[in-house]
């Protein structure tokens, strides 16, 4: 096992992979360490033999010129597609069409563009970093009994996890420690019959839910697979509920909404909850971390909480290290 690298990136979500890709393109030897069994972070897809759901990020948009160029490349490579299905807003009284914007999804799964990014990278999965320490100008990165060495490191984790890992003497520790991230309960469901609703996704502005999506309306998907996201307040209040409790409560709320929309109660199958403990950062803040002793942070919590923000924060982290002598 090669233990010496130019840069170690902790986290293989959008921020970590965009940083690693940029650093590798500049000629750095980069190792990415990821605690999960797969890449993608919240740009994840849950799959079974019969169904699949994008249970984290539902879609992404592109506002900056830099990200629009990346999106164009992904479109040419056919790892993303436009999601052109109608999206609505429910205010408790009526459904209205959501403001028009161009939405994109990975295809055939949400993490497809990240898989393309990862093709040329050295990534070690199922590796949870437990400690980092700078000794004689070199970062020692530990996971269980293994240790890797690099003069530079990118911490591309949710803010609370980054704060737990970064030594308190670094300014990025305080930046991460002062950032609150909100949880989100997701519920994945399947039904046998088409619901024939006038939308493929709907923002919910009242009650426990914040979002409902017909996941199968996205490119290269099939079936009648639906995804619910609970709002941050409900998710926080029910953070430690059992999966069975969450399924019962959110399933009942979905059927209540369907009845309001003139649909009969549905028998749902394959009900599977997932708790995102750190789902959303402050969507208003934009923070610009700097490299300190070869350490820099990245993540959507630094840049508006969106997929694009994660991508741009990864580039910014990489460029900060590349500008360091």
Image: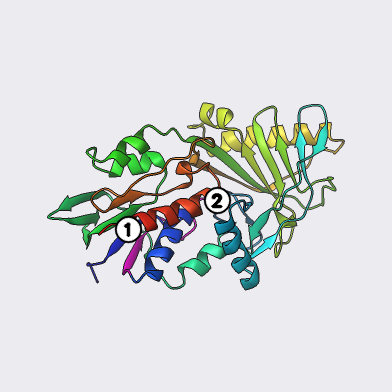
Residue at the spot x=58%, y=52% of the render?
64
Magenta stretch, overall SS: loop
* Above or below 73: residue 176: above
Image-based side of 59 in relation to 145, left or right: right
Residue 285 drawn at (x, y percent): 49, 36
Image-based side of 183 in relation to 193, left or right: left
Numbered mark located on residue 98 in the image: none
* Above or below 201: residue 74: below
* Above or below 278: residue 206: above
Nearer the observer, 259 or 207: 207
Q: Which residue is mark 1?
A: 323
Nearer the observer, 6 or 34: 6
Question: Marks 1 and 2, how far apart in space?
Answer: 25 Å
Residue at the spot x=51%, y=63% of the render?
114
First along the sequence among labels 1 and 2: 2
Numbered mark located on residue 307 in the image: 2
Image-quadrant location for residue 315: bottom left
Location of the C terminus by quadrant is bottom left
Residue 222 in sight: yes
User: Quick one: SS at disc 1?
Assistant: loop
Q: Which residues are magenta?
A: 28-42
Q: Residues within 10 Å of mark 1 (few under 14, many from 20)?
A: few
> Per the image, is 5 magenta?
no
Residue 122 in sight: no
Q: Residues within 10 Å of mark 2 (few under 14, many from 20)?
A: many
């Amino acid at each position: 096992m090669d233990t010496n690298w130019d840069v170690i990136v902790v986290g293989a979500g959008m921020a970590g992979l965009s940083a690693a890709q940029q650093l590798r393109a500049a000629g750095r030897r980069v190792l990415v360490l990821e605690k999960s069994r797969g890449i993608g972070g919240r740009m994840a897809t849950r799959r079974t033999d019969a169904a699949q759901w994008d249970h984290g990020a539902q879609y992404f948009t592109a506002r900056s010129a830099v990200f629009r160029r990346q999106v164009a490349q992904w479109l040419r490579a056919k790892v993303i597609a436009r999601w052109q299905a109608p999206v609505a807003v429910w205010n408790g009284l009526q459904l209205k069409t959501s403001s028009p914007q161009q939405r994109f999804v990975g295809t055939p799964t949400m993490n497809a563009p990240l898989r393309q990014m990862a093709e040329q990278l050295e990534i070690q999965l199922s590796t949870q970093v437990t400690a980092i320490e700078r000794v004689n100008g070199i970062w020692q990165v530990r996971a269980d009994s293994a240790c890797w060495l690099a003069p530079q490191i990118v911490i591309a984790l949710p803010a609370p996890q980054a704060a737990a890992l970064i030594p308190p003497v670094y300014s990025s520790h305080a930046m991460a420690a002062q950032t609150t991230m909100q949880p989100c309960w997701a519920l994945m469901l399947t039904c046998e019959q088409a619901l024939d609703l006038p939308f493929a996704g709907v923002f919910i502005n009242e009650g426990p839910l914040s979002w409902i999506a017909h996941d199968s309306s996205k490119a290269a998907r099939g079936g009648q697979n639906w995804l619910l996201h609970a709002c941050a307040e409900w998710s926080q209040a029910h953070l430690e509920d059992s999966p069975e409790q969450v399924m019962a409560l959110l399933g009942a709320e979905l059927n209540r909404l369907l009845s309001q929309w003139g649909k009969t109660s549905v028998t749902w199958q394959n009900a599977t909850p997932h708790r995102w403990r750190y789902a959303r950062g402050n969507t208003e803040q934009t923070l610009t971390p700097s490299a300190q002793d070869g350490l820099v942070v990245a993540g959507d919590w630094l840049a508006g909480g969106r997929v694009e923000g994660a991508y741009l924060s990864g580039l910014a982290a990489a460029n900060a290290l590349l500008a360091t002598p």
